[in-house]
Amino acid sequence: MYGSTELRRELAELVNTRFKAKRQVDEHNIFVTNGAGSAVNDLILATCDAGDGVLIPSPYYGGFEPDARIVGKVHSVPVPAPQSSPHFQPSIPAFESAMQLARLHNIAIKAIIVCTPNNPTGRTIPREIIRSYLEFAKQHKLHAIVDEVYALSVFREDEAAGLAPFESVLSWENIPDPERTHIVWSFSKDFGMSGMRSAAAITYSKAVHHAMHPYAVFTAIPRAIEDALTRMLSDTDFVTSYLAENNRRINDHYEHLTKILTTAGIEYLPANAAFFLWIDLRKWVNLLAGHTAGSHVQRNDETHLLATITEPPTPTSEDTTGALPPLAPIPTNRKEELCLFEKFIDGGVYAAPGAAFASPESGWFRIVYAMDKEILEEAVGRMVKVLRQIEAESHS
Ligand SMILES: Cc1ncc(COP(=O)(O)O)c(C=O)c1O
């Protein structure tokens, strides 16, 4: 139920060779699931009880929240990164504060979720930062779920820009608490196969592997797909050439997109992995805030908007979903950020607002550039049109 032996062996081989696992992984360390979301869900169910909490550095991939909440009834507790910190990653004191805040709400923290290479920033997070998080987890006997779904989509390094080469946690000499550290990887991203719904949780912990067994029946994948994936992974020449070509193309599109954004005067956080760019539209969000003093936001039924962009639902006193009262303050100008999101939609372009990633600062948007260059150019053109309109209105 948790994966054919053949597929688990091929996955172990992939992890040993391409993630450079220091302590060799075999089929007993692999638990196959129908997507990384299900792997996170199964790990949450195995390590937390309903009503517990998981700490997640924010901004974070919005899917972690439903992965924790919907089945496991586990609360996501954001650990906000300081405003525009170099890697958009919080410090250990921020983890301590988030844990204390959770305690005040009677929420016991049982795990942390870390994502590198990161969604939404498209950056590898330096080893020292990830290590400090895993040391923190060890100190508090927390499980660490490390989402490495973009591990094989790292297309450049630029240490001067803080873009470190990617190192899987599995490649470390000493993982702080290996029995409580679990890796998630998926075919969805690195192989562009999200429709195949195939992924794996990788753990050295027999206890956690065993605890996930009861859920395997709900998150297993069809045998025919397992066989096809086994054949694909066993063709290592294909895998090598596919990954090289994939990363060459992502890099090419990254170069193209960043050039057109620079010409348009839109700043962005340099990236080196996945296929996202975290762009800085604070200037226009601030213009909206200054110019309208909130008058643009009457169309923003925030609950509806947030639902469409997978933000955690706004809790009510009768809430039975397990959602929390906000544990992190709503940042200034969030409404204006959502207003800009709507203006983009009206202008025929989708850019995901920071709110969808629990961003602690308003004005950042995530754009995806894994598409034809002509489409990218058209999309940026539509965004620029909206931004110029805001500028014109602010001068009027
Ligand atoms: C960081 C991260 N983890 C997990 C997932 C879910 O992946 P899957 O399609 O394999 O469930 C995504 C999808 O966007 C993601 O970005």
Image: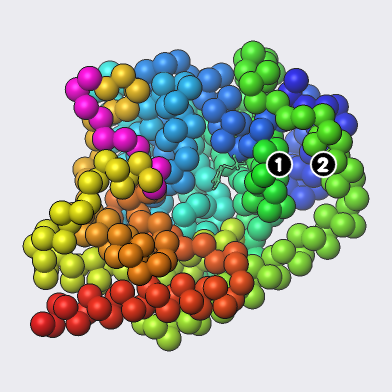
Classify residue 242 by image quadrant.
bottom right
**Which quadrant of the figure has residue 183?**
top right
Classify 10 Å Cα crowding around label 2: few (below 14), some (14-19), many (20 and above).
some
Residue at 86% x, 47% y is: 232
Residue under pointer 1: 196
Q: Residue 164, image x and y in percent?
A: 57, 62
323 or 169, which lies in front? 323
Give the secondary structure at mark 1.
helix
Alpha carbons under labels 2 and 1: distance apart: 9 Å
**49 within the magenta span:** no
Residue, disc 2: 229
126 over 55 or under it: above or below: below
Closer to us: 61 or 106: 61
Q: What amino acid type is highlighted by mark number 2?
A: Leu
| Screen quadrant of the N terminus | top right
Q: Which residues are magenta?
A: 309-318
